Image (cartoon, rainbow, N blue to C red):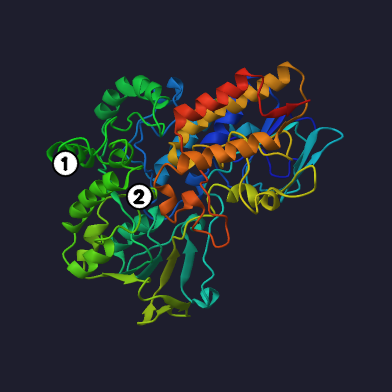
Amino acid sequence: MDHKLKPDAGKDENLDVLVVGAGFSGVYQLERLRELGFKVRLVEAGSGLGGIWYWNCYPGARVDTNGPLYQFSRPDLWEDWDWSEMFPGWQEMRAYFDHVDKKLNLSKDILFDTKVTGAEFDEKDRRWVVSTDTGYSANPKFLVICTGFGSKPYIPPIEGTSDFAGECYHSALWPQQGTSLGGKRVGVIGTGASGIQIAQEAAKEADHLTIFQRTPNLFLPMRQKQLTASDNVKMKKDYPQSFKRRRETFGGFDYDFIPRSALEVSEDERLAAYEDLWAKGGFHFWLGTFDDVLFNEEANRTAYDFWRNKTLAQIKDPVIAAKLAPAVAPHPFGTKRPSLVQNYYELFNQDNVHLVDISQDPIERITSKGVLTGSGEHELDLLAFATGFDAVTGGLTNIDIRGTDGKTIKQKWENGVRTLLGVATQGFPNLLFAYGPQAPTGFLNGPSSAEYQGDLILNLLVYMREREITRFEAETAAEEAWRQHNFDLVDETLFPQADSWYMGANIPGKTREILNYPGGLPLYLEKFNASAANNYEGFTLA
């Protein structure tokens, strides 16, 4: 990427908008704000574009959405871009962002290697005072934060972690230069998406792989496919319709739930539908299933039983199989985001792969040689913490953002999140955030969110400019109503029964509540547009 700005590029005193974060949402905001004539700058802590695809460079890191949908919908960006596989890896995602950068000339307005450390609203000037770790500062009218759902890694406080003499990395803080797994004794703590992706790679070349599992997760087949030039030509014929379809579906994909109950069809019909969804792979079995699976326990059980039978058939050892696919579901199917696997369950048929069930054999401490559990010491050369993130809110609460009363967002949300429409919070004027709490976020395809929620944010900023409004702020009553709306929606579902990051339950001390808008993209757009049509009802405009 040429023409990069230097991180110490002084001070921007007259910006209209400062955007934080160069993932899909931030890149979309930057380009569209420029088109609309705003004076805008973007700051990014990493050395390149991509957001989570800059930081996630661990072995096996790849997208869980098929490539054709995991991109911007602009024809000038996809017409001359071909995917090499259906579910792209991190290297290809970086190449894609380089492609976008070259097409749109983004880097000239981005400060890389620049981390925002603090922001405070100046009531007199009605501008934000933003500071960074490089000395660069800015005073924008509006601050748009696009740090995403996974920018604050979480490492559990296990005693002795600093004593380990081998290599030790969190999946989101993997060395950019990489590291070899070949011939090593590798340990992976955690069995979410990053954990199973690292495990699949380690099992190929590591001398021995030890997987530490607390709770079994319910993985779905990815159905990876290598793509040829002719495959890309064929797929591109469907792109316009697929992109159009996203707006109409719960998760911003080009497919949606079957508008029938799993219980109103015959068993043969239900099994046939499940077989079809399973064969398609990806999230079809999750977001393309019967429309009551995530609401009705009996319907949900039919999905779990089907999943379990498919999974058991892949594992030879019945003891291991029972730990990976237990008779009693660890949580209702689909109430944790399913990870997509290529050959994860088959790994346990290999002699060099060992499962440690830490619910029965808990970790006591990390030693200089490895991990000590009740059954003994597991000696390792490399230890990977695949323990996730302080998801959805962590990117915002990790910055010292202070509102009009001097309190930080972290302090305000100490006893639960309050937002208006998932983009603003009372006490923090002229601040907007994308892919954040109480928006569709973790239920939604990222690029779909970047464009659809992104346009809502852009429309709001244009509205302010056209009417010479210099200050907007969420109203307390409106954000309390939005919070209750989220609760009312999720209480109709099975999601509260799972201790997931969707519910903030993976972080000790974090308020347990739904962090993602559970009404789906169409309803979210309807609610936001209703506010806009009524002169942004719920905001105080000055």
- Residue 35 or 402: which is nearer the viewer? 402
Q: What element carries label 1?
A: helix
**Distance CA(mark 1)–CA(mark 2):** 22 Å
Q: Residue at x 22, y 42 (%)?
A: 278
Q: Pinpoint residue 13: horizontal percent, then vertical percent.
A: 80, 34
Assess disc 2: are there few (<14), some (14-19) or many (≥20) residues with their C-alpha within 10 Å of its C-alpha: many
- Which badge, 1 or 2, is on the more N-terminal residue? 1
Disc nearest the viewer among 1 and 2: 1
- Residue 308 or 314: which is nearer the viewer? 308
Q: Pinpoint residue 516: horizontal percent, then vertical percent.
A: 50, 42
Q: In which quarter of the image is residue 285?
A: top left
355 sits left or right of 473 in the view: left
Quadrant the C terminus occupies: top right
Q: Which residue is drawn at 43% across and 64% down?
A: 384
Q: What residue type is labelled 1?
A: Leu
Placement of 165 over or under 174, stated as above or below: below
289 sits left or right of 510 in the view: left
Q: Which amino acid does label 2 sit on?
A: Ser
Q: Pinpoint residue 2: horizontal percent, then vertical percent.
A: 58, 35
Q: Is residue 319 visible?
A: yes
Q: Pinpoint residue 206: horizontal percent, then vertical percent.
A: 31, 67
Q: Name the residue under label 2.
A: 339
Assess disc 1: are there few (<14), some (14-19) or many (≥20) residues with their C-alpha within 10 Å of its C-alpha: some
Q: How many marks?
A: 2
Q: Is mark 2 on a helix, strand or loop?
A: loop
Q: Name the residue under label 1.
A: 271
- Residue 103 or 12: which is nearer the viewer? 12
